[in-house]
Image: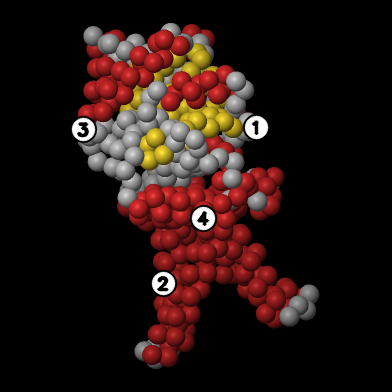
Amino acid sequence: MINIQQKHLLQAPSGLLQVPRLPQSSSTDGYAAQASNLIFPIHFTLIIPTFNERDNIEKMVAQLSQLLDKVLPNDYELLVVDDNSPDRTWEYALHLTEHYPNLQVMLRQNERGLSTAVIRGWQAARGEIVGVIDADLQHPPEVLLKLLEKIECGADLAVASRHVEGGGVSSWSAARRVLSRGAQLLGLVILPRVLSSVTDPMSGYFLVKRKAIAGIPLNPVGYKILLEVIGRGDIQQIAEVGYVFQEREVGESKVTWRQYKDYLHHLARLRIDSGRLGKWGRQLNFPVGRFIRFAFVGLSGLLVDMGLLYFFYDFLSIGLTRSAIFAGELAIVNNFLWNDRWTFKDLAQKQSSWQQLLKRFLKFNIICLMGLILKILLLNILFNGIHLNAYLANFLAIAIVTAWNFWINLRLNWRVTQVD
């Protein structure tokens, strides 16, 4: 029995968040992993991301299986992607495979988050059509057949919407309704092309053709994976189906204020990536969004430096040279912490021991010192050699050194955390 269950336990992919054009083996079975020619595509894969959904998963799998067995017998798979739930949802789902042979389970132990869970599931999926549905029964399973019908009729993307005919919410409070609509309106201002293409851009219930997202690097933030699909995918035709969002039967809601913060962050990232700066960055293979964060951190460091210089020199009267040294080093500490926790957070998280943190900090100090020397050289060349205005020369020198610091840190400092 254990061997049968193990065949349904898939290894979580790692590396770049990019859906392959053809299905790839992710079995934990050694023979299956080697014999990739045995991995045949099927028509449809539905991802069910879970975290503490043990009480809901059996009912959800039963309803979905009953529906799909009628329209796609032996030509579909349900893939539960669990983020190592404390209630061991993944283990319970694995036991269900004895009764539901089209059910697969993926356990993720090194990553968290709904959006990345969905993409990791798509990476292991065999379906020519892939989709996602919540495990908490708030998305009515019967709507799935209507979404499949829209895809069969030519849509690249079929979205279950609360804001078209037949859609709605069951018993949301006025505050939650206002927040939902407000988030959508704000999104229309920041990213009009993406948000205007569907009535419910925050929906987590949709299907998409694999070919529309295959081979495209994805970079989601938070829970709203649909924004990423529309913003980066090759989506030509979109169809929508109305549904009524249900209240949870069991379990706790996972809606938090952090989701709204991540939503705004995601909108900003997509806006940058889809604009001229993003296109320029892709042409030059330059991470524009990360560089903008690095520049903002540098600006905060400048404010820290100037404020502390005033504190040490004018307030404590400890001498200009020592004041400048103390202020400069504390500004470097400020910049390092923000860069480690924000600019390069995804890289830093992969190597989080205190020894590796200290190593990155020491390297950052050295790179900043080299940048300071480079800035002085450039300033002298621009001012004394080319005879530019002193303030313009200083600005250009800072801009060049900022780009240099960023690139060197990316290649020689935080990049190390991926391979050390």
Q: Quadrant of the N terminus?
A: top left
Which circle's residue, 2 or 4, is located before the other in the chain? Answer: 4
Say if residue 356 shows up in the picture: no
The reply to whether discs 1 and 3 touch (Cβ–Cβ < 8 Å) is no
Q: How far apart, in angstroms, are the residues tagged by discs 2 and 4?
A: 37 Å
Residue at 33% over, 35% down: 246
Please, what secondary structure does the residue beneath circle 2 have?
helix
Position of residue 370 in the picture relative to residue 325 (left or right) = right
Q: Can residue 301 be seen here?
A: yes
Q: In the displayed structure, does residue 175 sit left or right of residue 203?
A: left
Q: Residue at x 56, y 23 (%)?
A: 151
Residue type highlighted by circle 4:
Leu
Mark nearer the N terminus (4 vs 1):
4
Tag 2: residue type? Answer: Leu
Front-most of residues 242 and 51: 242
Mark seen at residue 236: 1
Circle nearer the viewer, 2 or 1: 1
Instruction: Give me the C-alpha separation between circle 3 and circle 2.
Output: 44 Å
The residues tagged by marks 4 and 1 sit, at their Cα atoms, a distance apart of: 24 Å
How far apart are the two marked residues, 1 and 3, measured between alpha carbons? Answer: 41 Å
**Residue at label 3?**
87
Instruction: Give above or below for 287 relative to 370.
Output: above
Task: First in sequence, mark 4 or 3: give its number.
Answer: 3
Query: What residue is shown with label 4?
Result: 186
Side of 257 where 23 appears, left or right: right
